[in-house]
Image (cartoon, grey):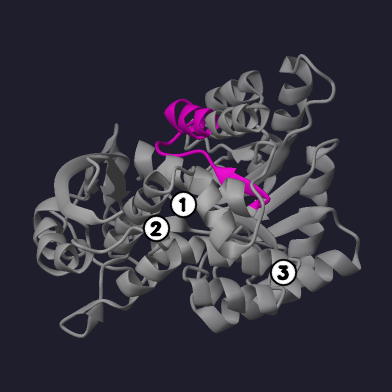
Amino acid sequence: MKIIDVVCSKARTGFFFDDQRAIKKGAVADGSAYFGETVTPGFKSVRQAGEAISVMLILEDGQIAWGDCAAVQYSGAGGRDPLFLAEDFIPIIEKYIKPELVGREAGSFKDLCAMLENLQVDGKRLHTAIRYGVSQAILDAVAKSSNRLMCEVVADEYGTTVSEEPIPIFTQSGDNRYDNSDKMILKGAAVMPHALINNVKTKLGEHGELLKEYVKWLSDRVLKLRNDENYMPVFHIDVYGTIGAIFGVDNYTAMADYLAELEEAAKPFHLRIEGPMDAEEREKQMLCLKGLREEVDRRGIDVELVADEWCNTLEDVKYFADNKSGHMAQIKTPDLGGINNIVEAVLYCKEKGFGAYQGGTCNETDRSAQVCVNCAMATKPDQILAKPGMGVDEGYMIVYNEMQRIIALRNAKKSR
């Protein structure tokens, strides 16, 4: 079935764009806003409304396939593509992508994504957000043209099988780490709480004491609120490099000592620590995570380390997995560009025996989250992020509901 038109519309995301460099330079938080001078090009304020672009592919039978182009919260930071504003990038899609798609058969997801990944404008690849959203629309178009679910298209083209069980959903609390943790427990979130431990003085503690107190509180809280003793959520906490900041990024002995204390505080629950250090460049980060994993494993400390900083692209994920830098990688969906790269990243991690966390950003949309669920159901990562939004309300609902729809539809198909 052919694609006969491409239509774009402006969209909002589930969170904000934040000028990370301005925040690091001292922009002051005031309620939900920040006050200070912008630093990153394109920003008009330190925090501004997140924008996206809905890309709709019109098929010749009148069906409409669609996806959302969305970028991460900290756009333009750490070597990422620039701030993604709809009015700037809709003309790019209409000028360069529309002519490539109109008249093409919506036959092969992989082939159409390969074309998209290879497109260049002025010698540069398309913005990651564009590749992210257009590839979602392509997957939907191939699914609709062949009367399959999106997860079934991915499974068929990559030689996998669609999961018959839900993928564990990982919820994040933002700074509201106490009230949101209660919500997670009441809703039965499989992995929780993120906790946003991004400041040594106010959140980790100068000796790590504040995080240790929070982990112990979290363990006690689950035991108090759960209605089923079989509910045993994984504790996954992102520390934004703060553990390395107090102990030294390559002081593996001291960091492992502290992780052993966190392991004890978390009992009887399993603990994952994301981003224990930030070595401020890719090669050193790989070596530091590798060294800390070796120390943790040698001592039998039951804490998994999750690669985040400096592990952004498909190539980065492969590099960290090859070197066993940590136990798991966050596959940050918008940063990888086309969703075909997400599929390949998850499958590569599984092939290497490395944990695969299909993540992303709070600054996504309902549609990008739904399509990511289909990718996850076809590739079976260890967990998938609840998104969009910061918290456990809309994001958990969107991801959970899409997963349940897929399972129900496939069960109904089998019974017919």
Vertical comparison of 339 with 376: above or below: below
> Could you tell me which secondary element the residue under label 1 belongs to?
loop
Circle nearer the N terminus (3, 2): 2
Q: Is any part of residue 150 visible from this angle?
A: yes
Q: Is residue 381 magenta?
A: yes
Look at label 2 and name its amino acid.
Pro
Q: CA distance from mark 1 to mark 3?
A: 21 Å
Per the image, the residue denoted by label 1 is 360
Magenta stretch bounds = 380-402
Question: Hey, which quadrant is residue 317 in on the image?
Answer: bottom right
Per the image, the residue denoted by label 2 is 334
Circle nearer the N terminus (1, 2): 2
> Could you tell me which secondary element the residue under label 3 belongs to?
helix
Quick one: label 1, few (<14), some, or many (20+) residues within 10 Å?
many
Looking at this view, is 175 or 391 the one in front? 391
Is the Cβ of the residue at disc 1 closer than 8 Å to that at disc 2?
A: yes
Per the image, the residue denoted by label 3 is 351
Circle nearer the N terminus (1, 3): 3
Which quadrant holds the C terminus? top right
